[in-house]
Image (cartoon, grey):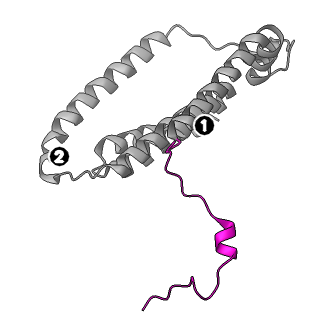
Amino acid sequence: MQSIHLFLLSILVLSSFFVLISSNPVHSVLFLVFTIFNASLILFFFNVEFLALIFIIVYVGAIAVLFLFVIMMLNIKMSSSKMFLYYPVFFIVSFVVLVQIFLVLEVSFSDVSVVDTQSFVVFDVLSNIEVIGQSLYNYFLCVFLLAGLILLVAMIGAIILTLNFSSARKNELAFRQLSRNDNSLTFFE
């Protein structure tokens, strides 16, 4: 289990590194999506299913897709000669930040002792999503329904804003189309 965790962490660091050094913005967004998927896999391994699903739904489903559409709509032309000038600064800053993170983690986890998990008695077998769902539907049902109503109003408002209300509508004249004869026909040459 620890080897899988370390493997996922190394892929997470590597994919986040490629987000920064990728010269193509579309590739950078795709590496960002891959990084978020790796982070949610790590959260699944820690039995934090709700946060993992929220990462996938919110960050990949909304924000990363929005980034991808914006980047694809813009006509970005990057000169690759200027980009290579910032690589040494990026490597130095990222190395300093990683060393500081590892030092903080080492200090914070130095006092942690290993606890025998066999001695604990399991009282409840509900997962995180089930506990959050139970508390939402039991204690916060009115707030949950109000949030759904607000989202419905926002969706209807977005649809109305995109409609084009023009008074010059072209209607079909079915009687005129069905009552054609040889005198009203026009031939194009």
Residue 113 location in percent, x, y?
60, 10
- Secondary structure under badge 2? helix
Q: CA distance from mark 1 to mark 2?
A: 32 Å
Answer with left or right where residue 93 lies relative to residue 1.
Answer: left
Dot 1 crowding, Cα within 10 Å, few <14, some 14–19, many 20+:
many
The answer to whether mark 1 and mark 2 are in CB contact below 8 A is no
Residue 71 location in percent, x, y?
35, 47
Residue 47 visible in the shown view: no
- Secondary structure under badge 1? helix
178 inside magenta stretch:
yes
Give the numbered dot on residue 110. none
Residue 79 visible in the shown view: yes
- Where 175 falls versus 5 (above or below)? below
Residue 95 location in percent, x, y?
27, 30
- Where 121 falls versus 93 (above or below)? above
Residue at (60, 35) in percent of width and height = 57
Tell me how many marks there are. Answer: 2
Q: What span is in magenta? A: 163-189
Examine the residues drawn in magenta and state their main secondary structure.
loop
Q: Quadrant of residue 106?
A: top left
Q: Nearer the viewer, residue 41 or 118?
A: 41
Q: Which residue is mark 1?
A: 41
Task: Looking at the image, tell me whether mark 1 or mark 2 is earlier in sequence order.
Answer: 1
- Where 85 falls versus 169 (above or below)? above
Q: Nearer the viewer, mark 1 or mark 2?
A: 2
- Where 42 falls versus 87 (above or below)? above
Residue at (31, 40) in percent of width and height = 20
Q: Which residue is mark 2?
A: 83
Residue at (71, 15) in percent of width and height = 146
Answer with left or right where residue 168 lies relative to residue 175.
Answer: left
Q: Quadrant of residue 89?
A: top left
